[in-house]
Image (cartoon, rainbow, N blue to C red):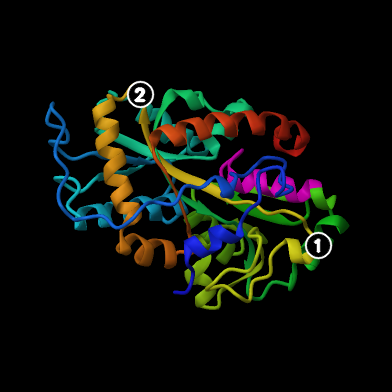
Amino acid sequence: MGLRATALLSALTFTIAACGGGGTGPPVAATASAPAQPTSTALATTKAGYPSRAITFIIPYAAGGGSDIMARSLDKVAQDLKLFPQSFTISNVTGGSGFTGKQQAISRPADGYTLTIVDDPNIFGQILQQAPMKYTDFTYVARMVLDYNMVVVRTESSHKTLKDWLDAAKAKPKGVSVGGTGIGNNDHVQLANIEKKTGTSFNYVSFDSGGQVMTNLLGGKVDSAMANPSEAYEQMRAGKVRSLGITSEKRIGDLPDIPTLREQGVDYVVAQFRGIGGPKGMPADVVAYLEEALKRVAQSEAWKKEYLEKFQQLDGYMGSAEFTKWMDDFYKENEQAFKELPSLKQ
């Protein structure tokens, strides 16, 4: 695998405003690279003996999607590095565009024994008034990765290019279906930005995970899909699906034949983020323990080779304090941007 996250990050100097996405994607230039190599020495427990048992990791999406892949990859690397006494107890809790699982996670004691995925919908859901919680109801432990998105179709699709896909939507508004994960989530928001920039109108169809999106695309239930490279990579390698374009600034390492949206006339560059969080009010020493453990994961060669490179991800590591401030800024920047995306409220 040829993708090197650090090399890509040096090339990606756009901000939310500059990406043309109206603020609906994280500023890649704000990424803090994880520092030098970790040791595999177990971390010292806190004064209260944390962690003394398995940590429950609630993935708020179905198996097979980008968040599921990240969480399971993280668990494997963490165990190989002996950072926790036991493997995570992983639970996929689906529904509510990811908010059902997140609500379950933050409803549990803030003792560090329940973690969950935090991502762009933590912000989007509050702005769109679709989430049962506020983004401030979480403790933000660490941001881990940034991920691009793609427009994908079945190999035999009549849409051979991005232009074909856009022209079909212009000719018959709502006539081209696009699968994606959740309402008000990254796929939905990014499609809305594409619609705004191109004067098109697609029929967005929501599923519980990227894995379900790909299953329904392959089964002919939708005409096309928004998918992360990690969700579509194996199907692309098998020749089952094609990507019409990717939201990166430049073509990326292991997918050099996939043109960017920008080079095809759609000025839209964006990356979404994924991180780890838990209920609001987690003890400072517990957060520090988790932050150090996740930093060691992010620094490790296993994480870089077995996850970042394999699944075409970017290193997006931030520690807890930086990540928390970044979330506040991200919320403010997106409040105004979403007013310009009326299709999200239809």
Neighbour class for label 1 at 10 Å: few (<14), some, many (≥20)?
few
Residue to which mark 1 is pinned: 265
> Which residue shows up at 70% across the image and 55% down it?
177
Secondary structure beneath label 2: loop
User: How far apart are the two marked residues, 2 and 1, measured between alpha carbons?
Assistant: 45 Å
Can residue 121 be seen here? The reply is yes
Residue to which mark 2 is pinned: 107
Q: Is residue 167 magenta?
A: no
**Does residue 344 appear left or right of residue 33 in this picture?**
right
Examine the rendered structure and indicate whether residue 155 appears above or below residue 170.
below
Q: How many marks?
A: 2
Secondary structure beneath label 1: loop
Residue depth check, mark 2 versus mark 1: number of the one nearer the observer: 1
Name the residue type under label 1: Gly
Name the residue type under label 2: Ser
Q: Which residues are magenta?
A: 181-196
- Name the one closer to the observer, 140 or 234: 140
- Name the one closer to the observer, 335 or 205: 335
Examine the rendered structure and indicate whether residue 63 appears above or below residue 241.
above
Give the image location of residue 88, x and y in percent: 24, 45
Neighbour class for label 2 at 10 Å: few (<14), some, many (≥20)?
some
Nearest to N terminus: mark 2 or mark 1: 2
